[in-house]
């Protein structure tokens, strides 16, 4: 509740400050601000959103025991006495193979691996596909440790390969990312990283457990998205009418994306399990795959919507600062020039992100004697296509909505300074400012 009170105090203080400025709400040296009446309206609209979000978190918070799905794979379930461990490969012996350069997929059984776990060496079983990837001496691995298994007599090996140990590389890359953000964006970058961390906490601590605890997935995703939006936006960009305008635009985009996603998922009959994970969820829980698809669409669209709405709000504010004499229609048209460029680039971003994540699937289906269009309408590919199109539609609609709202907010408090009588041969201030804005855009 502290954040809500701080936001309300900020807007109320800004409203009193705007009243004291009376005749002039904005100059070329200052940023435009909303009128006291508009600030009050924004508070009235913002408080219910925050209160509903808090209420949703309380009502939908998972209270049941942690779910352990059967058949969840080697990283989730183990037999009695079997544990996860980190191992280092100490030896590779291919002497028993028929050739000096054996084919791992055909002769994997002839290759013998030795690994060390906590100072204890033992035999290691490595899958053929992992051998193809180049498992060798010195590699760090994630393994299953069978040395203390209750069925030790039936186990022929001490350790079983699960995957490579990537903790250090990924941690190093994450640190590098944080340092780059801080170096370029400074304190605002730190606030953005804090918002990102909060978003991760909401997803891991609330959204995923709540869905597994049989809470309505779409409602859970909407509440999680709302909580992330409110905290992340104000953390990264500060408490202001500009940020609140972007927040309202993001909410509108999320609602549109969610409704359209739910409709298309039902119409296109996408709630069918095509993957091992899908079969596992449908067989062991009462989670609806159709609802999960909508959740995925909402989470995907959230980040992109935050990007475009804050950019459009900033565009409106900056244009109003440079050219305060612009009428509402002119301000909207010029801000939409920026918005159209953003639409084009962001649509590419969404599409290529999905294509990159599904590249392996695309390669497999392209090798079959089947039309590409038919391939896009089948199975998981159809789900990806629907996700791309729904997110893109929500994004495109959110940009003009945010721009229009920003224009209304800015114009409510925008009073240009009194004009001095132009001297002979001089350029009227409005033309000079409009020319400056045009040159900045062109």
Image (tube, helix red, strand yellow):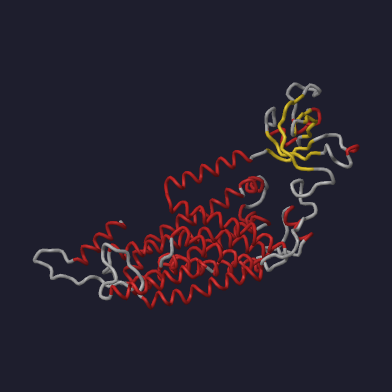
Q: Tell whether 331 sits left or right of 89.
A: left
The total of numbered circles placed on residues is: 0
Residue 67: image location, x then y, percent? 75, 58
Residue 431: image location, x then y, percent? 21, 65
Taking the spot 51% from the left edge, 52% from the top edge, the residue there is: 193
Residue 216: image location, x then y, percent? 68, 68
Residue 377: image location, x then y, percent? 64, 58
Query: In the figure, residue 263 lies in which quadrant?
Result: bottom right
Q: Is residue 150 above or below residue 404?
A: above
Can you name the residue that lies furthest to the right here? 153
Q: Tell whether 136 sits left or right of 319.
A: right
Taking the spot 77% from the left edge, 55% from the top edge, the residue there is: 68
Given residues 418 and 55, the one toward you in this image is: 55
Taking the spot 81% from the left edge, 28% from the top edge, the residue there is: 110
Quarter of the image with the N terminus is: bottom right
Can you name the residue that lies furthest to the left here? 424
Quarter of the image with the C terminus is: bottom left
Query: In the figure, residue 351 lies in which quadrant?
Result: bottom right
Given residues 7 and 349, the one toward you in this image is: 7
Query: In the figure, residue 37 lies in which quadrant?
Result: bottom left
């Amino acid at each position: 509740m502290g954040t809500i009170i701080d936001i309300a105090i900020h807007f109320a203080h800004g409203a009193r400050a705007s009243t004291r400025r009376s005749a002039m709400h904005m100059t070329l040296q200052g940023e435009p601000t909303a009128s006291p009446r508009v600030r009050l309206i924004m508070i009235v609209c913002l408080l219910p959103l925050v209160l509903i979000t808090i209420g949703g978190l309380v009502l939908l918070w998972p209270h049941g025991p942690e779910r352990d799905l059967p058949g969840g794979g080697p990283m989730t379930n183990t037999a009695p006495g079997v544990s996860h461990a980190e191992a280092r490969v100490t030896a590779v012996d291919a002497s028993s193979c028929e050739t000096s350069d054996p084919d791992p997929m055909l002769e994997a059984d002839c290759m013998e691996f030795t690994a060390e776990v906590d100072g204890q060496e033992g035999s290691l079983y490595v899958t053929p596909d992992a051998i193809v990837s180049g498992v060798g001496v010195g590699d760090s691995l994630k393994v299953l440790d069978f040395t203390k298994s209750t069925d030790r007599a039936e186990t022929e090996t001490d350790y079983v390969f699960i995957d490579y140990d990537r903790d250090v590389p990924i941690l190093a890359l994450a640190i590098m990312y944080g340092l780059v953000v801080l170096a370029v964006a400074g304190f605002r970058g730190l606030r953005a990283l804090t918002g990102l961390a909060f978003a991760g906490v909401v997803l891991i601590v609330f959204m995923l457990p709540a869905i597994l605890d049989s809470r309505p997935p779409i409602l859970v995703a909407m509440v999680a998205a709302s909580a992330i939006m409110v905290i992340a936006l104000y953390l990264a960009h500060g408490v202001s009418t500009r940020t609140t305008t972007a927040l309202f635009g993001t909410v509108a985009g999320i609602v549109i994306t969610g409704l359209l996603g739910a409709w298309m998922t039902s119409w296109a009959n996408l709630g069918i399990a095509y993957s091992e994970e899908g079969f596992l969820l449908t067989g062991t829980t009462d989670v609806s795959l159709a609802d999960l698809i909508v959740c995925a669409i909402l989470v995907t669209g959230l980040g992109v919507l935050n990007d475009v709405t804050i950019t459009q709000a900033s565009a409106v504010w900056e244009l109003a600062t440079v050219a305060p004499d612009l009428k509402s229609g002119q301000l909207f048209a010029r801000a939409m020039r920026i918005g159209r460029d953003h639409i084009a680039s962001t649509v590419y971003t969404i599409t290529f992100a999905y294509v990159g994540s599904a590249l392996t699937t695309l390669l497999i289906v392209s090798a079959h004697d089947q039309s590409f269009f038919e391939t896009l309408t089948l199975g998981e590919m159809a789900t990806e296509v629907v996700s791309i199109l729904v997110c893109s539609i929500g994004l495109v609609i959110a940009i003009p909505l945010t721009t229009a709202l920003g224009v209304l907010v800015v114009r409510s408090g925008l009073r240009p300074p009194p004009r001095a009588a132009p001297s002979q041969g001089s350029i009227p201030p409005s033309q000079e400012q409009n020319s400056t804005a045009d040159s900045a855009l062109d």
